Image (spheres, coloured by chain):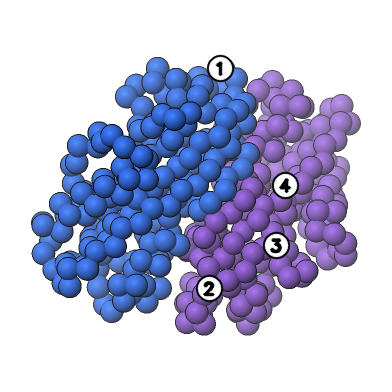
Chain colours: A blue, B purple
Amino acid sequence: MNQRLILASGSPRRKELLTLMGIPFTVSSVNIDEHLEGAPDEVVMALASAKAAAAAIRHPGAMVLGADTLVYCNGETLGKPVNEEDALRMLRMLSGNGNYVYTGVCIINGATGEKLVRCARSHVQFVKISEDSMLRYVQSGEPMDKAGAYGVQGMGGMFVSSIEGSPSNVIGLPMHLVREMLMKMGWQL
Amino acid sequence: MNQRLILASGSPRRKELLTLMGIPFTVSSVNIDEHLEGAPDEVVMALASAKAAAAAIRHPGAMVLGADTLVYCNGETLGKPVNEEDALRMLRMLSGNGNYVYTGVCIINGATGEKLVRCARSHVQFVKISEDSMLRYVQSGEPMDKAGAYGVQGMGGMFVSSIEGSPSNVIGLPMHLVREMLMKMGWQL
């Protein structure tokens, strides 16, 4: 199949991961109200579906991918921090603690109407972090545009002692799952 | 402490991971005969120590870090593939299978004579990969300079369904372990 994917997300990490997979795509980011109540897996799948659906309307007949990621810790859902104080609050929660990263992925084939929605979950274990380390990390700017206020693929990687699950899911797009879903839709990968 | 680390490794991935940690360093790669018999954890710790020791001689009084990574699958140790056929052989072993990534890390403080040697191990689970996918992956060139013929941080990430352990260890340098070891040596991180 000689096709181009529409990525319904403005996330630079998702762009990077799709590029690594060798998938030709065009970005068409959509604005969705990301505040939803519910179990984390349901929330990310609902938001991924909403993003894909919005982009599908804009690109009739195209193959569209929507995704949404959140971090879940101590029964609380962590999105992107609203400011540095909020980032520090999240890092204090994560320090010495485990958290779960959920990414929902929705692919819509506009030509056939076919739709797939899946979710990946990874567990991430943090080392204990001192207040000084947290402050330096927040001042680096890295936490500010990331769900849960950390990037495992960046400086934040040094706070992560182990993960269980897909590593690319923790970055924002579970590559093996996207591959599997696209292959079901007829792509060669 | 206002110090500079000597990195006894020419690996671009290790350079990148140390840079992410915000550690000032200078590369001083050393040539070590990497063929050693023994248990994988012992081999990587011995090679990491040999690299650090060789660089420490060249840089008296400095803080030196040596590291070595190998992949262990079906009781066989996988280093870097010698050619494309060898890369395909490794990928056929990895397909649908689990493998272990070992990285040995040795830090020598040339000023005090102190030396730390540690090892990290991560389990990596691969999806089933078709011969066509393997061929495309080998032709991308990515496997050729990597132990076990894959890079989890690159296109190879789409073949990895899950890992258990440090994700940066799978790339070639366990960041949380390096952080812990440097902190023991008096660095602020």
| Mark 4 vs mark 1, CA separation in Å | 26 Å
The answer to which image quadrant residue B19 occupies is top right
Where B97 falls versus B177 (above or below)? below
- Subunit of label 3: B
Residue type at the position of mark 2: Lys
According to the picture, the residue beneath numbered tag 1 turns out to be A131
Disc 4 secondary structure class: strand
Q: Residue at x 57, y 17 (%)?
A: A132
Callout 4: 10 Å neighbours few (<14), some, many (20+)? many
The answer to which image quadrant residue B151 occupies is bottom right
* Residue B128 tag number: 2
The answer to the question of whether label 4 and label 1 lie on touching residues, with beta carbons closer than 8 A, is no
* Residue B120 tag number: 4
Can see residue A105?
A: yes
Give a yes or no on whether discs 3 and 1 share a subunit. no
Callout 1: 10 Å neighbours few (<14), some, many (20+)? few
Disc 3 secondary structure class: strand
Residue type at the position of mark 3: Val
Task: Specify whether B65 is left or right of B124.
Answer: right
According to the picture, the residue beneath numbered tag 3 turns out to be B71
Residue type at the position of mark 1: Glu
x, y percent for residue B104: 76, 49
| Mark 2 vs mark 1, CA separation in Å | 44 Å
Q: What is the count of numbered marks?
A: 4
